[in-house]
Image (cartoon, rainbow, N blue to C red):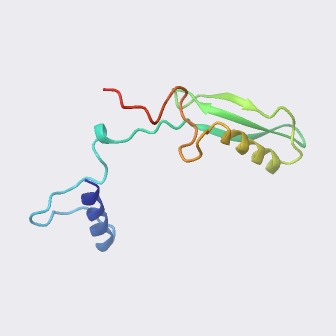
Amino acid sequence: MENKVAAVLQKSAASGGQTGGLAEPGESEVPLQPPCQDALISHVRRIAVHVDEPHPGHFFWVLTEECDDANRWRELESAPLSHDSWRDALHAGVRALEGYAPDPRTGPRQPGEDEDADPVG
């Protein structure tokens, strides 16, 4: 399947990026995305870093995580002490966020997930 998708992408690049039109004789039209049941689902937690300044010159990093409802976010953690600049607070917040990712290749994952476990079903 990957080879067919790669061929479609190469053909698209050669034709100026257009993937529409009729397939050549003997070729089957290959969708650029796999069907839903074959798609890999990302389980990376949606965690954001922002900086708050409740008093002039006192900057705090804050980590928030998206809830089940994409319109709601909950606070995970915040700086215990203020920083002298926005940039210092932001960098400290990013380091705190990195602490949620035991493996930097895969990022922060939902609690209890084991990427190496056999699939269920």
Specify the farthest residue to the left. 25
Q: Residue 33: image x %, image y %?
A: 31, 50
Count of numbered circles on the image: 0
Q: Residue 105: image x %, image y %?
A: 55, 47
94 vs 23: above or below: above
For image coordinates 57% across by 37% down, the residue present is: 46
For the C terminus, the image quarter is top left
Q: Residue 71: image x %, image y %?
A: 56, 31
Could you say which is closer to the camera, residue 39 or residue 23? 39
For image coordinates 30% across by 68% down, the residue present is: 10
Q: Residue 80: image x %, image y %?
A: 83, 31
Could you say which is closer to the camera, residue 65 or residue 118? 118
For image coordinates 59% across by 46% down, the residue present is: 104
61 vs 6: above or below: above
22 vs 35: above or below: below
14 to the left or right of 90: left
68 to the left or right of 63: left
Could you say which is closer to the camera, residue 69 or residue 79? 79
66 to the left or right of 38: right
79 to the left or right of 109: right
For image coordinates 87% across by 42% down, the residue present is: 83
